[in-house]
Amino acid sequence: MAERGGVRAVLLAGGEGRRMGPLGTGRLKPLIPYGGACRLIDFSLDNAHASGLGEVLLLSQFEERRLMDDLHQVWNARQGLRVHFGPYDTAYRDAGPGRLPGELPPRTDPPERGTADALIRKAPYVFGPGTEQVLVLHADHVYRFDYGPLIATHRASGAALTLAYQRIERRWVHLFGMVDFDARQRLTQFVEKPQDPTSSLVFAAFCVFDADVLHRHLEQLDGTAWQHDISRDVIPAMLAAGEDIRGYEVRGHWADIGTVERYHRAHLALVDDPRGGLPVDRMPWTIRPDVRRAWVPGAPGVRSSWVPRDLVNEGQVERSVLFPGVRIEAGARVRRSVVLPGAVVPPDADIDSAVVLENGAVQRVPLPHTEGALT
């Protein structure tokens, strides 16, 4: 079951999206549309594919069937990457690429209460024969990254854990896991969401563990008064035990999309710097891949926006990101906004600083932004 010569990639995708407001209502957070092109979960999966990892194990319990059905139809029908569904995988394999199975066998394992629980409860699938390293990924981070050099550096060092980190403005560090290293890039400090940050470095939420060391620490923590979390329990326990933990700096665009404010702010960054950061044309294209998107600096009815080629526009669009299937009716004005697939903006509507949902509902986002860091 191990991939890429002993590496098992696992994707933590249990987010409910409660902090996303109406944008997260009725949908799974990993499947929230992003950038006019894809969903949040598609970044980690596409990165794994581009890194030569042929399989990723999905770890999720929240509305798991909906997520598995979606990923099976979108990703398992493609060549080069397969999403493994743990105890349900045989049913999806038997159904065939892109086809959905009927009833799934009932769960027999206890509910998972955190990211570390997801690893220990699925241990037979995570720590299978031949697994030497475990690459842990999350489903709500926006970035493009080749995991190959990270894995190679980890192996060469002989470390128990190599975690990705990025330098950000210190005023935002309290929103993340703060890390610090010595001159040899060995971890000296890890504090989840510190009140008074002393470092400008944050955990970028993906890392490579030595499989045996990770399994041992999970077993030691299981059954204790822990929080069932990788960042709050596992990494601090490894650090306290004197394990060799190294850092690997992530350069370039990386964003944690934790709230609707940060979601909206990330889209404004796309239109304010259309070729910097992570432009739409570098994203995975999983939402209507048949419809091309383009940056329009200025044209009749559109200014400084990412728009799909199938846009029907009888109004004005400024500094916005639009998905395929959108229609802007006569006299409507859309500014500094995200318009999701298939949404219709009615005649003479004036929408500013908002997310327009698929059904046309408008979720306002206050400006200026006071929360979140985009790096």
Image (spheres, rainbow, N blue to C red):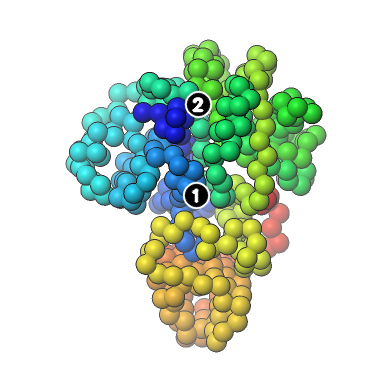
Query: How many labels sit on residues?
Result: 2
Front residue of 265/144: it is 144
> In the picture provided, is 254 more to the left or to the right than 325?
right
Question: Looking at the image, is mark 2 or mark 1 earlier in the sequence?
Answer: 1
The answer to whether 298 is drawn above or below residue 51 in the figure is below
**Residue 233 appears in the figure:** no
What residue is drawn where x is 56% and y is 19%?
Answer: 226
Q: Which residue sits at x=41%, y=57%?
A: 286
Q: Which residue is mark 1?
A: 43
- Mark 1: secondary structure: helix
Q: Where is residue 244 drawn, in percent x and y?
A: 66, 20
Q: Position of residue 66 (x, y in %)?
A: 33, 45
Q: Which mark is residue 204?
A: none
Compared with 137, 143 (above or below) is below
258 in relation to 209, above or below: below
Amino acid under disc 1: Phe
Residue 133: mark in rendering:
2
